[in-house]
Amino acid sequence: WGGGGALPPLVEPRCPARGIFALDPLRLTVDARALGGGYALEQWLVDRWAVYAELASADRLTFVLGPGTRAGHIRVLLEALRDAQRLAGPAVEGRRAQLDSSQVERVLRGGVQLATPREAFYAQSRAVPIEQAVGRASAELVYAYPPGVPIICPGECVRAEAVELLRAVLALGGSVVAADDELRTLRVVDTD
């Protein structure tokens, strides 16, 4: 990156590690936890520098370098990241909310299946206010993107902690993929 500036703490070159075969040299993943989180940093970079990440998550940004990437593009990206480090306090004031990793782990461990995914997907279903979906069998797949890992699966008992996690992702600026991506309602198996 041409020296000058304390950029290395942002970069996580952890390879090889368990489950990782190799690093993609055309992807740069930035740990944004100290800078307000991935979603907040992405918005700041777009607003201030017109720099766009390929992928943002709650605590990381991934940039893709390709055949069209020139040295000038990389210089702008690195200067923008240095600027974010310098301005970390003011730039992300009040935006330091993070996902609770223990909550994520609990939710991802899975819940109770009330029906098979196939049964639930093809069953009669209806959309109910999401608060009323808790304790019922989901009729849809709901996930946060990125990373695209299902949080609620068809047939699974909808848990309050899963709903809280999805709402936290939305509050941080992330995306939820569901029939109602604003999470006002959720499709559940109709038992009436």
Image: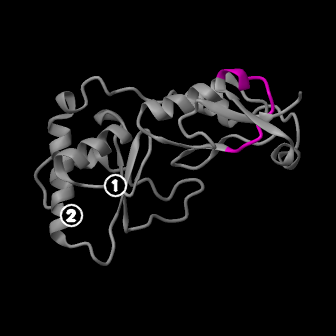
Is residue 23 depicted above or below 129 in this figure? below
The residue sitting at 32% across, 68% down in the picture is 65
Residue closer to the observer: 123 or 32: 123
Q: What x and y, as percent, mark residue 21?
A: 55, 64
| Residue 185, magenta (yes or no) | no
The three-letter amino acid code for the residue at tag 2 is: Ile
Is residue 91 depicted above or below 12 in this figure? above
Helix, strand or loop under label 2: helix
The residue sitting at 64% across, 29% down in the picture is 162
The residue tagged 2 is 74
Q: What x and y, as percent, mark residue 140?
A: 72, 43
Question: Does the image show residue 19?
Answer: yes
Q: Residue furthest bottom?
A: 67
Magenta extent: 131-141
Is residue 155 depicted above or below 95 in this figure? below
Q: Give the Cα distance between marks 1 and 2.
A: 12 Å
Q: What x and y, as percent, mark residue 186?
A: 68, 34
Name the dominant secondary structure of the magenta segment: loop
Label 1 neighbour load within 10 Å: few <14, some 14-19, many 20+: many
The earlier-in-sequence mark between 1 and 2 is 1
* Contact flag, marks 1 and 2 (Cβ < 8 Å): no
The mark closer to the camera, 1 or 2, is 1
The three-letter amino acid code for the residue at tag 1 is: Ala
The residue tagged 1 is 53
